[in-house]
Image (cartoon, helix red, strand yellow):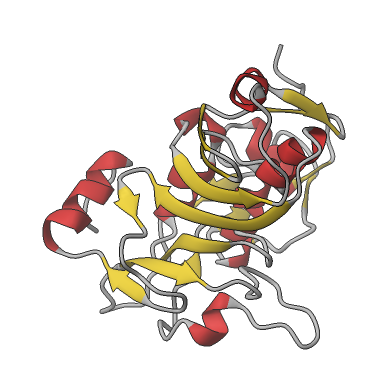
Amino acid sequence: MAEAIIYPMRINRYLALKGLATRRGADQLIKLGLVRLAGRVAVLGDKVENVEVAVEVMKSKIASGKKPVYIAYYKPRGIIAHSPQDFEQSIDQISGFPGTFPIGRLDKDSEGLILLTNDGRVTERLLHPRFKHEKEYKVTVREAIPLNLKKVLEEGVYNAGDWLKAKSVMVVPPHTMHIILTEGKKHHIRRMLSEAKLTVEKLIRTRVMDIYLGALKPGKARVLEGEARKAFLASIDLGEL
C-alpha cells in the first residue's frame, strides 16, 4: 500500500511519494532549480503545506544556446560526488566540464563510472528505482570469498532497516567479484558485504546501463556523441531538446 501524503510535508518526500523522483533525486532537482512550489523556485527544506499548493517539476534547465551534453566520467577515489566538506574536492571542481552535474552518487572511497550532464531531465530517469537500470561494479575484498556468497547476495541481506540485494553476482576467486545492482541504496555494496563479514579493498563502477567505463583512466572523460548519444537518450526514453 502506498504511503499517504500527510500535509505539511517536506518537498523532497512529497516528490518521492508522487513517484516523480527518489528523495535523493528530488534534492538534486531542487538544487538545479528545476522544481517550482506555488509559482516560485523551490529550495531545499521547503514544505508543501496542503493539497492546493502547486508543485511543478520542470523538464530541464539549460542556458539559452547551450546544447545538452552527456559525459562518461571516471571519478577518482577520494573525490566527492556532491557537497564537499573542508579539504575535500568534488567532481565539479576537477572534471573540466563546467555547468554539468553528476547523476547519482559514488562514495568517496569508491571510483569509476559516473555520468555528468547539464540536462535536468536525466536525473529522474536514471535515479528513480522504478526504472531498474543496471549498474555493474568490480569489487575486491580482503578476505577469501565464501562459496555461498553469490546465493546470499542474490537472495538479499538485511542491514540497518534495509533489505539489500544484488541482481547478479559473479565470483572470481579468491578475492574478486562482479556485482550488478538495479537499485542503489546508500553504501549498498559495502553494507551487503559487511553482513558477509567481508572487507572492501577496492570498489569500481564499470558500467551504467549500456555505458561502460572502458579504457578511461581516473579523472578522464568521454563525451557521448553520435550513435552513443542517441542510444543513451533512447534507453531512458528521452529525445533531443
Q: Residue drawn at (55%, 66%), measured in percent from left and top?
A: 32
Give the image quarter of residue 188. Answer: top right
Q: Is residue 105 visible?
A: no
Task: In the displayed orientation, state which residue is furthest to the left.
Answer: 226
Q: Nearer the viewer, residue 202 or 103?
A: 202
Towards the viewer: 229 or 154: 154
Q: Is the residue 153 above or below the residue 198 in the image?
A: above
Is 215 drawn above or below residue 166 in the view shown?
Answer: below
Report x, y in % for residue 34.
53, 60
Residue 163 lies in quadrant: top right
Horizontal and vertical percent position of residue 183 = 57, 35
Give the quadrant of residue 17: top right
Q: Is residue 26 left or right of residue 177?
A: right
Q: Going by the image, does 3 lie left or right of 18?
A: right
Residue at image coords 59%, 25%: 150
In the image shown, does 87 or 29 lie closer to the viewer? 87
Coordinates of residue 118 in the picture (x, y in percent): 40, 68
Q: Quadrant of the C terminus?
A: bottom left
The residue sitting at 41% across, 53% down in the picture is: 121
